[in-house]
Image (cartoon, rainbow, N blue to C red):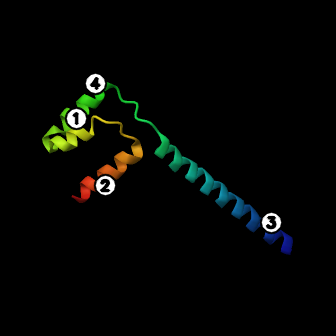
């Protein structure tokens, strides 16, 4: 009986470990993802952000990795 309980907890530990590995890989993938916007899309984003300020519009012209967008949006929301 003791082996059945140990085997069940081992399976649970393996499943939890697998989920953690997948989550870490997903977060890493988001941080390494590149910005694939074209030049016209960048200009369009900058023009749309112009009413919020020239500095915010200028930020839209550069490369924007998704993780940086999240950080920037959180920072803008708190200001």
Mark-to-mark CA distance, 3 and 1: 57 Å
Q: Position of residue 1 (x, y in %)?
A: 86, 74
Residue at image position (35%, 52%) is 71
> Between 7 and 20, which is closer to the camera in this rendering?
20
Q: Viewer-nearest of labels 3 and 1?
A: 1
Q: Residues within 10 Å of mark 2 (few under 14, many from 20)?
A: few
Q: Earlier in the sequence, mark 1 or mark 2?
A: 1
Residues tagged 3 and 2 counted as in contact (Cβ below 8 A) = no
Residue labelled with disc 2 = 74
Q: Earlier in the sequence, mark 3 or mark 4?
A: 3
Residue labelled with disc 4 = 40
Q: Position of residue 62 (x, y in %)?
A: 31, 36
Residue at image position (83%, 69%) is 4
Residue at image position (85%, 70%) is 3
* Left or right of residue 38: residue 13: right
Q: Is residue 26 above or below residue 78?
A: above
Disc ID at residue 7:
3
Please tell me whether mark 4 sits on a helix, a strand or a loop: helix
> Between 7 and 49, which is closer to the camera in this rendering?
49
Please tell me whether mark 3 sits on a helix, a strand or a loop: helix
Mark-to-mark CA distance, 3 and 2: 44 Å
Q: Earlier in the sequence, mark 4 or mark 2?
A: 4
* Left or right of residue 39: residue 54: left
Residue at image position (80%, 66%) is 7
Residue labelled with disc 1 = 46
């Amino acid at each position: 009986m003791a082996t059945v309980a140990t085997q069940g907890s081992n399976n649970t530990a393996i499943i939890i470990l697998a989920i953690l590995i997948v989550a870490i890989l997903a977060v890493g993938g988001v941080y390494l993802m590149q910005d694939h916007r074209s030049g016209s899309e960048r200009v369009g984003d900058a023009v749309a952000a112009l009413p919020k300020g020239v500095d915010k519009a200028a930020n839209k012209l550069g490369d924007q990795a998704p993780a940086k967008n999240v950080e920037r949006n959180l920072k803008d929301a708190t200001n």
